[in-house]
């Protein structure tokens, strides 16, 4: 174990026991007694209130007020953190390996009863993200996250749209946002001289620079992305707002379909609003909607209404022969 792990183990033992000698600590942790002395000194230097009593019944102990303070997470907190880690990993969290190490360390400092209880809660809890980000963007996500923290300009090669030419540009990253199964970097684009959103999976190459920028005060990347949904991310196919009205059961079923679940923006009892790429309005979208018959009604856009009428007319003509 690392030095930090061993020091935490000593704290754990002292918290669980009223008093322990250096030899008892050394035997429990399978280390030399001199190593225990060094770790005790390091803990004291860092401010941990360890009391050393000499004599026949001597040993090391923690001050009572420190002993009563929670040293680690309780069972419910551990369970919640491990469950949250599953969600983060499925979303393509850029520090997945570090997250796994943290979860492993979390489990290491639990007793057998707690460990068994956690495992029972893990068996029936799984997360499946149907549109998980590609694994090859992890390095880009890490670099962008670090550049947001350090306020350093990045130079990237970005692919606009579907199979369009790649374009070089410099950006000042303001924040990363995970939305509808995709990662977006909100940044000031030097080429456009404006704040833009870029899909991270469209970045072909990314290189740091020594240039430092000043991040706008109180800027929210999340608010910017949601506020500008009608203006598609740079290089993206145009997003069209679709408003559909229907009964509760039909709308629930529609919002659960793979195509619409990722595009849902707003939902009420009888109305749902989606933002869907323009080219899908002529292909997949109308055919999915036709399967709901008269249980739903397209309120907008008109081009989708017209496309539904066109397809329905062709079906009527075909089956009337």
Image (cartoon, rainbow, N blue to C red):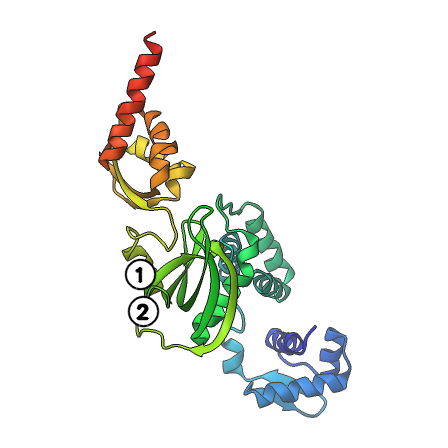
Visible residue check, residue 247: no
Q: Is residue 103 left or right of residue 159?
A: right
Q: Are marks 1 and 2 in contact (CB under 8 Å)?
A: yes
For disc 1, the marked residue is 224
Element under disc 2: loop
Q: Quadrant of residue 18?
A: bottom right
Q: Is residue 80 visible?
A: yes
Residue of label 2: 219
Q: CA distance from mark 1 to mark 2?
A: 8 Å
| Pointer 1 local density, CA inside 10 Å: few below 14, some 14–19, many at least 20 | some
Q: Quadrant of the C terminus?
A: top left
**258 or 109: which is nearer to us?**
258
Q: Residue at x 31, y 13 (%)?
A: 317
Image coordinates of residue 229 in percent, x first then y, are: 30, 52
Q: Residue furthest front?
A: 165
| Residue 32 image position (x, y, % from top left) | 78, 82
Would residue 39 be found to the left or right of residue 208 on screen? Answer: right
Residue sitting at 33 percent across and 41 percent down?
A: 278
Q: Quadrant of the N terminus?
A: bottom right
Q: Secondary structure at mark 1?
A: helix
Residue at image point 71% right, 79% down: 25
């Amino acid at each position: 174990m690392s030095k930090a792990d061993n020091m935490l183990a000593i704290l754990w033992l002292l918290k669980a026991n009223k008093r322990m000698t250096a030899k008892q600590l050394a035997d429990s942790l399978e280390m030399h007694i001199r190593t225990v002395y060094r770790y005790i000194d390091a803990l004291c230097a860092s401010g941990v209130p360890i009391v050393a009593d000499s004599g026949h019944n001597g040993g090391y102990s923690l001050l009572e007020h420190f002993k009563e303070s929670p040293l680690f997470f309780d069972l419910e907190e551990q369970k919640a953190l491990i469950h949250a880690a599953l969600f983060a990993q499925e979303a393509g969290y850029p520090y997945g390996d570090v997250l796994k190490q943290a979860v492993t360390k979390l489990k290491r400092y639990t007793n057998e009863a707690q460990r068994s209880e956690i495992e029972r809660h893990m068996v029936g809890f799984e997360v499946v993200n149907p549109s998980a980000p590609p694994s090859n963007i992890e390095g880009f996500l890490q670099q962008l996250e670090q550049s947001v923290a350090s306020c350093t300009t990045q130079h990237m090669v970005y692919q606009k749209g579907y199979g369009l030419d790649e374009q070089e540009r410099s950006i000042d990253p303001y924040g990363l946002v995970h939305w509808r199964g995709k990662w977006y970097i909100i940044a000031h684009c030097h080429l456009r001289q404006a704040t833009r959103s870029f899909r991270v999976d469209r970045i072909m190459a990314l290189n740091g620079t020594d240039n430092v920028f000043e991040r706008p005060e109180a800027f929210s990347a999340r608010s910017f992305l949601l506020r500008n949904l009608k203006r598609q991310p740079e290089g993206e196919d145009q997003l069209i707002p679709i408003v559909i009205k229907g009964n509760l059961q039909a709308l629930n079923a529609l919002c659960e379909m793979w195509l619409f679940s990722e595009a849902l923006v707003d939902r009420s009892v009888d109305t749902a609003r989606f933002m869907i790429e323009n080219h899908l309005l002529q292909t997949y979208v109308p055919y999915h909607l036709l399967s709901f018959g008269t249980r739903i009604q397209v309120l907008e856009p008109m081009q989708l209404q017209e496309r539904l009428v066109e397809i329905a007319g062709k079906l009527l003509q075909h089956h009337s022969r």
